[in-house]
Image: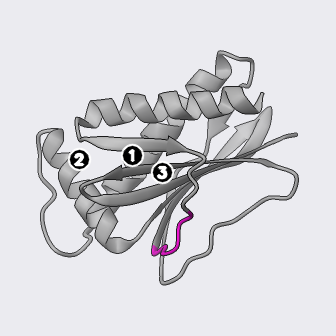
Amino acid sequence: MEQKIKTILAESLRDILKETKIKTKQTIDPEEKNTKTEIISSLGIVGKYKGYGLLFFDKNTALKFTTEASRALGYALEGTTLTELHRSFILEFTNQLFGRLVSKLSTIGIDSMLTPPSLLMGNNLNPISIAKAQETTAKIEGNFGKIFIKLILKNK
C-alpha cells in the first residue's frame, strides 16, 4: 500500500505541475530535508484514512513560485512581498494538489475527503509528525527554489 500511495503522490504532483507549465523536477522521498520553513500550507484528510497534506516554503520561494506559476497560467502576481493574492494562490495550489491525490486514492479503495486548507506563517516552523502513521515526502525544485511536501496518512 505504501508504494501505491507514493505513486499516487507522484502522479498528482506531475498532473498539477503540468498544468502550471513551469519547469520543475520532482523527487519522492528526497534525501535532502527541509531546513528553513517560514510558511506551511496544510489541509486535513478525513475518511477511511486520516492525516494531513503539507507544503513547506521559505518566504522567498513562496513569492517566486506564486509569481512564476501565475505567469504560466496567464496572469501575474507581482511584487516583493507576499500579498493576500499570493497566499490565496498557495492555498489553492495545496487544495488542487491534494484534491487530485484524494481522487486518485479513491480508485484504490481509500475514500477520503479534504478539510479547507490553511496557512501558517512564522520563523523556523517545525513540521508535524503523527505516531504510527505513514509519511511520504516529496520535493519540487525549479527556478523558484525548493518546495517540500509531506503526506501523512494513518488508517483509522
Q: CA distance from mark 1 to mark 3?
A: 15 Å
87 with respect to 135 (left or right): left
Q: Mark 1 near mark 3, Cβ–Cβ under 8 Å?
A: no
* Secondary structure beneath label 3: strand
Mark sitting on residue 93? 1
Callout 3: 10 Å neighbours few (<14), some, many (20+)? Answer: many
Q: Quadrant of residue 67?
A: bottom left
Q: What distance separates the C-alpha of mark 2 from that of mark 3?
A: 16 Å
Instruction: Please determine whether, in this image, residue 123 is positioned above or below residue 74.
Output: below
- x and y, in percent, of residue 150 in the image: 60, 52
Q: Position of residue 145 (x, y in %)?
A: 32, 61
Pointer 3 residue: 139
> How is the model colour-coded?
one colour
Let me know if residue 85 appears in the view: no
- The disc label shown at residue 69, or none: 2
What residue do we see at 19% from left, 52% from top?
A: 68
